[in-house]
Image (cartoon, rainbow, N blue to C red):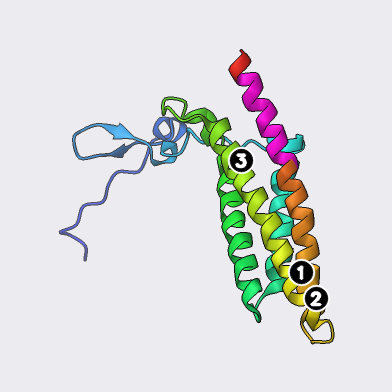
Amino acid sequence: MMSGTSAAPPKTQSQAERGGGVSNGAGQTGTNSNALSWLEINVEYFKTWPGICKILELLFGIICMACASPALLSGTHWFLFVVVTSFISAIAWTAIYLLSIRQQLNRIPIDWTLTEFLNTGVSAILYVIAFLVQIIVWIPYTGFYASGANITAGVFGILNAIVYWYATILLYNDYKDSRAA
């Protein structure tokens, strides 16, 4: 029935042990499994104070978004903008540390500590402004059905601002120590 088709020969044991080769059409073989071999999972970072700060930034950010959504008053729009922007930034920095991207991209002339310091410092300042706006806007509406959740979002905004400030201090110390060396 299948007289016109030819099947590829099965892999030998030695090919399978070597990872098996995939031809790229030029007679060279390579493996597809090594495409992301430069990435290394670094869970140890999250056992340090800066890593714990990253986890708390994400956790408090999720709570702030959950409690303040949907934005019913104009101040909450600003609050959610700051929370979501900072959350996305925290996800990016978490991925950078989790996947050891910072260590692997040492050829790119980026001052990683200064970049993260500036990003975290700006987020801390914006969080202070945002939680103040959120609480000030919602205090007059204490009898409103959504006021409890929105004031809770403001309180977790305070906690997240404290975490961002602490992370900024840690990053400043790292930056200062890296310049002294």
Q: Which residue lies furthest to the left in this view?
A: 4
Label 2: which residue? 139
Question: Is 129 one of the magenta-colored residues?
Answer: no
What percent of the width, then of the height, locates residue 20?
A: 39, 36
Residue that label 1 marks: 135
Q: Nearer the viewer, mark 2 or mark 3?
A: 2
- Note whether residue 44 is visible: no
Magenta stretch: dominant secondary structure: helix
| Kind of residue at badge 2 | Ile
- Where is the N terminus found, in terms of image quarters? bottom left
| Helix, strand or loop status at disc 3 | helix
Q: Nearer the viewer, residue 27 or 115?
A: 115
Percent of width and height locating residue 2: 21, 62
Real-space Cα separation, disc 1 to disc 3, in angstroms:
34 Å
Q: Distance between the residues labelled 2 and 3?
A: 39 Å
Quadrant (top left, top right, bottom left, bottom right) of the C terminus: top right
Which x, y percent locates residue 83?
64, 61
Which secondary structure, mark 1? helix
Q: What stretch is highlighted in magenta?
A: 166-178
Residue to which mark 3 is pinned: 98
Compare residues 75 and 6 and report the one nearer the observer: 75
Amino acid type, mark 1: Ile
Q: Do the residues labelled 1 and 3 touch (CB within 8 Å)?
A: no
Q: Is residue 52 left or right of residue 94?
A: right
Corner quadrant of residue 68: bottom right
Q: Residue 170 carries which label?
A: none
